[in-house]
Amino acid sequence: MRLLFVNYEFPPVGGGAAYASLATARELVAMGHRVDFLTAATPGASRDHEIDGVRVFRVRCYRRGVHDIGILGALTFVAFAAPRLRALARENHYDVCHYYFGLPTGLLSCVPGAHRDRPYIISLRGSDVPGYSVNLRRYHRFLLPITRRIWHRAHRVLANSQDLRRLAQASVPGVRIDVILNGAATSSAARSPRAPGAPVRVLTVSRLIERKGLDTLIKAVALSSDRTLHLDIAGEGPEGAVLQRLARSCGVADRVRFLGFVDRLRLSSLYAHIDMFALVSRAESCSMAMLEAMAAGLPVIATRVGGNVELIQHERNGLLVDPGNVETLARALSALAADPQQRLRFGACNRALVEQRFGWRAVAQRYESVFRETVCSPVEMAVEPDAELSILQPPTGTDA
């Protein structure tokens, strides 16, 4: 098949969707498909190029930051991508167009051009779903008629967690939405043994925004009775200065490190030297950072929100806590810090889970099933609807 992926994010710019879309594209190329990728230019990467067989086409985009496109960035990407999309579709006759994010990327499905003659898929990632991000509520309310049109005209709409699917269906009833969770790649690198008496290091990787609940995590470290706990925060965002002041006011500035933006190579090294991973978001779809931590063999403490509960089973491969509950989170951190054997058990279970069910090849095969169903007739596919749905939706929990 000839596939066109469209995403305004592309590594190293953006969040989990950037890495998920590129990893999926790479696997599909390895499986024998042709994948072109239309994305935004970034500093140091403004020209078209190729990565592992994926042809990458870039257009101008005025982003506010590495993790923040902003309204101007979203509008400029759509404006500059539209003529390039029309030209690519006219020249390459794609079988399917795959838009990551219903907004702003999905707006391109409404632009006149050759691509309008081909079916398209929408992958919902979180911020593009009404009700997911409080700060985007007024924009989603204004754009809801357009959102409905984009989703209804799509051949398929995909969400990356069951929770995001429910939220999306509440906003746009009557649209079929299936689920394909994110993936991760396991590494053969050995984890570094912890020296006796060394601090117990907790890592979180996220944008520094209110939704990620990092204030709760800092307060929990301060409240914990275990003074060996040290917290590393990888990421950048508008809440950085506020969180640093909070760490000072809580008396844990010496035990909380703000690492700023961390590239993939350095992040892999961090995973090898960390004792546990924490994701304490108030809302989350399917965290790439958490999946990568699981793939690295780390135990996880996560909040009971979104896709977290589809990846973590309480006391089997991690601990789940209610979002915003400082006391419960502090107890969970202390308990796991005091039990190295439990950390090993959780970590081993997480690594096995990713290897068995959430490797990128398995994720790409689920997307391939959707693409084939999109371009083939029901007779050619010979797949019963119920069977097809079971292929696309991995079961919840961690029964692997």
Image (spheres, helix red, strand yellow):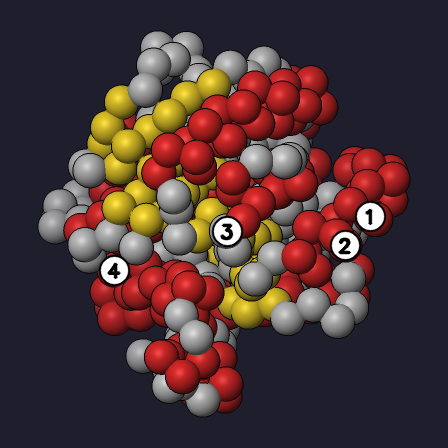
In primary-sequence order, the first of circles 4 and 2 is: 2
User: In this image, 102 relative to 345: left or right?
Assistant: right
Residue 254 got which mark? none
* Distance Cα–Cα, label 3 vs label 4: 25 Å
Q: Amino acid under label 3? A: Arg
Residue at image location 52% in from the left, 42% down from the top: 115
Residue 361 got which mark? 4
Q: Position of residue 164 (x, y in %)?
A: 63, 61
Q: Nearer the viewer, mark 3 or mark 2?
A: 3
Q: Amino acid under label 1? A: Leu
Task: Give yes or no for contact between labels 4 and 2 (Cβ–Cβ under 8 Å).
Answer: no
Instruction: Examine the rendered structure and indicate whether residue 24 appears above or below residue 364.
Output: above
Look at mark 2 in the image and give the residue it sits on: 148
Look at mark 3 in the image and give the residue it sits on: 118
Determine the secondary structure under disc 2. Answer: helix
Q: Quadrant of the C terminus?
A: bottom left
Q: Position of residue 119 (x, y in %)?
A: 52, 55
**Residue situated in front as seen by the camera: 164 or 108:** 108
Residue at image location 43% in from the left, 16% down from the top: 42
* Distance Cα–Cα, label 2 vs label 1: 6 Å
Q: Amino acid under label 2? A: Arg
In primary-sequence order, the first of circles 3 and 2 is: 3
In primary-sequence order, the first of circles 3 and 1 is: 3
Determine the secondary structure under disc 1. Answer: helix
Instruction: Examine the rendered structure and indicate whether residue 282 appears above or below residue 83.
Output: below
In primary-sequence order, the first of circles 4 and 1 is: 1
Task: Give yes or no for contact between labels 2 and 1 (Cβ–Cβ under 8 Å).
Answer: yes
Residue at image location 69% in from the left, 68% down from the top: 175
Look at mark 1 in the image and give the residue it sits on: 144
User: In this image, 51 relative to 68: left or right?
Assistant: left
Q: Position of residue 32 (x, y in %)?
A: 18, 54
Pointer 4 local density, CA inside 10 Å: few below 14, some 14–19, many at least 20 = many
